[in-house]
Image (cartoon, coloured by chain):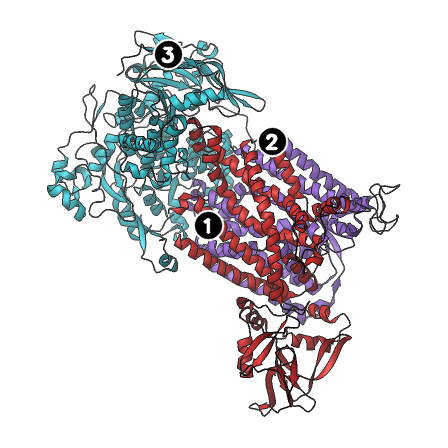
Amino acid sequence: MSNNTNDTAVLKCENLAIAYKVRGGEIEAVQNVSFEIHKGETYGIVGESGCGKSTAAWAVVNFLGSNGYVKRGNIWFQGQDLVNKDGEELRKLRGNNIAMVYQDPMQALNPSMVIGDQMREVLTVHQEISEEEATQRCIDMLEKVYMPDAANVLKRYPHQISGGQQQRVVIATALLINPALLIMDEPTTALDVTVEAAVLDLIDELRREFDTAIMYITHNLGVVARVCDKVGVMYAGEMVERGTVKDIFKNPQHPYTQGLIRAVPKLGANKEGSILYPIPGRVPAPNARPSGCMFAPRCDYVTERCRTEHPELRRVGTDNVDVRCHLTEEIDAAAWVPGDNIDVPDLTKRNLDTEPIMVLDKLQKYYDVKGSSILDALGFGKKRHVKAVEGATFSVPKGSTLGIVGESGSGKSTLIKTIIGLEQATGGEATFLNFDVTTDLAERDPGLIQELQMVFQNPDSTMNPSYTVGQQIGRPMERFGTVPKDEVRGEVMKLLKQMRLGENYFDRLPRQLSGGEKQRVGIARALASRPDVVLCDEPVSALDVSVQAAILNLLLNVQAEHKTTMLFIAHDLSVVRFFSDNIAVMYLGEIMEIGPSESIYAPPYHPYTEALLSAVPVPDPSAIQKHIRLEGDIPSAIDPPSGCRFHTRCPRKAMLPNNGKICEEQIPPWQEGADGHKIFCHIPIEELATFDPVISAPNSGVAV
Amino acid sequence: MTTETRSKAPTVWSNIANYLKLVSESRIATIGLAMVLFWIIVGLTSFVWTPQDPNASLGIPNRGIQDGFMLGTDRIGRDNLSRTMAGTQVILMKTRIPELSVGAYLLGIAGISAIVLGLVALPWASDKRTRQKGFIGLIIAAVLIPIANIIANSTGLNDIIIPKFAIPVGVAIWGVAGSLTLGSTLGLIAGYRGGTWDQVIMQILDALIAFPRIVLYLVVITALGQGDLVMIFAIAVTGAPGVARLARSQALEIKSRDYIRAAETRGESIWYIMFREILPNAIGPLLVDAMLRVGYAVFTIGTLGFLGRGLPPPEPDWGNMINLARPSFGQAPLSVLVPAFAIVTLVVGLNLFADGLNEEITRYQK
Amino acid sequence: MGRFLFRSVISIIVTMVLVSILLFVMLDPRDGAVLVKILGIEATPEQQESLANQLALDTPIMTRYLDWVIGNDWRAERLIGSDVVLLEDPRTGDSSWWIDEGNERYIQYEVNTDGLMVPLVRQPAGEYIKEAPVDLWETDAEGNKFFWGLDAKGRGALWDDSGATEFISTQTGWQELAGAPVDYIPIRKGVLRGDAGISWRTSRSISNAVYLRAGNTFKLAGLAFVVVMPLALLFGIIAGINEGKFLDRFISIVGLIGTSTPEFVSGLVFILLFALTWSLFPSQSADLIGTGLKPKHYVLPVLTLTAVELGYVIRMTRASMVDVMKAPYIRTAIIKGMPYRRVVLRHALRNALMAPITIIMLHINYLVGGIVVVEAIFAYPGLGDYIFKSAVFGDIYALAAAAMVTVIVAVLTRLFGDLAYTLLNPRIRFS
């Protein structure tokens, strides 16, 4: 991609070590990090949370807080040493040459300044540029990042534009100074997949146009595969492997990199090919790092040497790959088999009951919205609703898993909240074993409440910080009386064991657990009342990839054991594939497509499903993915588009006569395909079936 | 996964030990605690020993430092040091229950029961499942006092007099405990239930908060007369809205957590959710705030004492001491400065303790 | 915005209604302690009863509440059968109620020993002349004679022929007077129309006193506000951007000690130093009601208020500034290479002022509270002093009226605070 690697590097870090002073000593958050980034090159820094990726970036901009400092090593920027520069010089250098974009664009923009002021000052403070000229340049830059109505956006406050647009503003601001180095710290993590895809396209395009060097920090291997030229993999504060993206994805050398790639959900060839293998254990805390190889405690190939001798980064083979491992030459990744210490789900076709345990018919949930006029305050205003869920119809066979996929605002969370009774349905029917479940919890019988339980998204808030693990898992048993009082402890121990947590976890408090462990406890708590149905609200989306896989596999095994029915929410299609029996795709409160999981990933697609699939970053640089991008933002659910709710953004609308006039006027029909596969679209299913598959992997030739 | 030594389930003692450890890690909190402890020790000592009898005129009036009167005498010759020491008692150490009839006790018990029952029933009433029970409870609470009144008047209970006595713990602390109970319950309902409950409760509390504090105290004391119990009531009522606001904001924040959803999907009662799920996680900031409130209470009792509307004699009251010494401030400044020193150091100590602890808790939670 | 204002106004009205009920119910003189206070400890039960009747304390609390809020002149007019007006006595400046018979003829009545009504006709100078007695008795359904009029004190009064007596205050004490009315309506327009009746303590119009004294108090409070706020914001911001450093600790500790020192202590110390020892400023303002206050009279009260208020606002501003300086958008600004001064002034300040502004407005409340003490120390003729004296005397209507004024100030400042917050915070302004 870039051929000017012989120039001086724009950024060069050598043996960088960064330490934070804490009470009673200091912690070395980052050590032994070396890499260089050249002009026009995107360098990915990838790793799980707590591996020191962001710290390295903050060190480059000298923003380590009052207690952090560069302990060893050098940072060279265009041949100048940044470490020993004083504040004012650094500030000037930074303001003129280095820009940074980070995770949450809403947080990064000043809420009480109009966007124009925040952008213009970059030009006016550093350079002698008049206000008018600065404004013009801001407008030009915003147009370059495809911001609609650029001149107007300058007069707005950050909260008045959408998240995707905010990130465009941040990126445009960063590019205004035409920086030599652009640091991006998880710039798309807070965004929806379709928005993320568009922003990633933008980054790639800008890199080509401006020839900027980009340091791209992410935890997402798919994103690395899509936008980076080179990549450095970080683990426990160290860089363990670096090389070109192609080489590393094709032939990862370090066991950690290999493990990561095995743990990432891929839109791979088939269902079995998408099984995820976790890496056992967890990233050691900075003050508890092993003395030998950092990865030794979790490594499948560990030897005595790994435990005692710290490996150095070294060049291996003929590839341009450096790796920090003693055993690289001896490891054959292709021959890897999962060890005994990890769960692997049994995907042999289960015999599913056809008997549905839960049936939804046109279930509807509207929220009232309060207007802001005086009439509304008096109660005379026109009644308006957020139409969060509309016409949800499906049935879930006993013991099966239904995956529900949708971006934010799709109504997927509202749907399961309504089923479990946290919200009261405003219309339609829903039954669970012939019990009505349209009412809210207050009107439900304890016997019914007990049968529907939930696993939550955020590990940090799923457990009450004031109670021990044992108390929290035991509580549902006491509450529903499923277990006699004196046997509760034993039963909790049993569940802990099932969750692969030792008995010593019984008396631990949540703050003593890692994110993955908290999610395990959350699952145990949901299972404690022996429910028939467990609803999972993105239980792994906040976890690191290596842990995600473990939790998903655990869920699958538990399900097999208890014959539990699961509803599983996810925000993209990559995670749910291998364990869902059925998948429903939601958009703006409506189900767009539903069917057996295999049929969702192959034509005929609903145009929205097709766009979603095309947006997911695939962790394989060689995969060929169709390029479909949705325009505009998701419309408001208060006044959803008429006819088909997707028509305002549908890339396939033009296939219908009159540029899809029918989509704007009529509610689409449910078209049935094979095996109960249903698509909610005006375009005839035969025509939808003629689309090419979204992803094709050249090496396997198998189409999805 | 690392195998750690088995940790014990947290107990009350380990929680206290935890907090003490936090305190010891903050220099500010330690200094504050030392200042507060100093006055607690002084107060305890004053029960058994003071250099002179605090209520007897033994020295020459309005004299400075002299033999036997380390910090001078006030305008009728009482020992400033002894009086200042004894002044700790009514604030921190003991509450004097006056001579009252059995009928009055009956009324008082009915009043407290009505408040407690009301606080129990109000959350019930806000929950669909227990609404009926809740409203019945509220009705019973409302009629308790009238019934007690009738009983007291129709029988001879008003004529049987129970002599005065004192109960442990001072006015400032009882008062703050009262506002904590009242305010946190109301705040938790408002925050957790939201909607109409929130609006009604906060509207009523806003009416109380709209009074300048000292004015509300003056109104209460004018209405009910001076006395330890009235002061406790006044502190509780004036403090409750502030506590409720804090408890409400805590509840609002905590109720969005998933573990609250988990409790709801278990069909837990509103009581369980409010007091077992939310309160334990909100108690830290509430207790820190309560410590500040004890400080305000000391301050306000002093002010009222100065205005002559504070705690009744014979026990000395710092504010009142200053008031009495005021005309001769020029000749005998110590009579003003010694009790002033007591008020300032106690309030500063409580503030430092609360601030330091707060800083540590925030750091600890990160 | 419309909705916000509408809701605020509704909320203020509800608050005021609640506050007025609360005040009235709490201060209701249920055990006659007030009567003892006015009559003295040796008053007989008959005397107390008569006074309760004259003050209309024997009517139901609901009636008294309504009388107090919306007035009872209309009720009196209905009973008397003609209009009544409030006229000022040019000799004393006090006002009294008169029956308006038209043509500038205003009368009150007296019942003489013959049981006849003596019209007292008001003269322009304020005094009245007695006219010839007339028989104005009416007869009710049961044949009893009665007459509704205004007595010589301007109170609505009901006479009958039973020969009731009343106890009135004279220079020598309480006197029994025959030929008195049997029932009274102390006429007032009600607080809604700005008339809270006559003070028991001073026997003068409550509203006039409150109006005068509130003016004085607002001068003092306003001055203190103007001194405290800029200083507090400045120090708070300085402390906030130097979090954890010596300057921060120093400002915080000094502020804390100031806040923890009661006004009566700092006030006395200031008096000792500046008035008694160095004679720089006067310590008392009491004798200056007529001649007006000079700037030097404000120095010590304002200084005292500043000492106690400064620390509190510093604390709020500092906390807010510390929070804001940790916000990611400040990080953005620094990384954009903005000079530190610009980061603080342009990026941090506005956001940092948002949170304290509502609290500062709420704090005016405490300022008014603190003024009670300051006015007592410096004998400053303000509202706080009036509240205090009314409270000590048990003059409940005066206390309630003055307390209502402080509450109105509090809710209005809170509204201003909310408005200011809205204006500073674009997120609310544009939603």
Image side of residue B261 versus residue A243, left or right: right
The percent coordinates of residue C51 (x first, y second) are 69, 75
Which residue is at the far top? A318
| Distance CA(mark 3)–CA(mark 2) | 49 Å
Which chain is depicted purple?
A: B
Q: Residue at x 72, y 82 (%)?
A: C177
Of marks 1 and 3, the one in the foreground: 1
Please report contact status of discs 3 and 2: CB closer than 8 Å, yes or no.
Answer: no
Residue C8 visible at all = yes
Q: Which numbered circle lies on residue C247?
A: 2
Q: Which residue is mark 1?
A: C419
**Residue toward you, B220 or B112:** B220
Question: Which mark sits nearer the N-terminus, 2 or 1?
Answer: 2
Q: Chain of mark 2?
A: C
Q: Is residue A563 above or below residue B60?
A: above
Q: Which residue is mark 3?
A: A323
| Distance CA(mark 1)–CA(mark 3) | 61 Å
Q: Is residue A628 above or below residue B171?
A: above
Q: Amino acid at mark 2?
A: Leu
Q: Residue at x 59, y 29 (%)?
A: C245
| Distance CA(mark 2)–CA(mark 1) | 33 Å
Which of the image's four quarters has the C terminus of chain A? top left
* Badge 3 and badge 2 both on one subunit: no
* Quadrant in which residue C166 is drawn: bottom right
SS category of the residue bearing label 2: helix
Of marks 3 and 2, the one in the foreground: 2
Colour chosen for chain C: red
Colour chosen for chain A: cyan
Q: Amino acid at mark 3?
A: Val
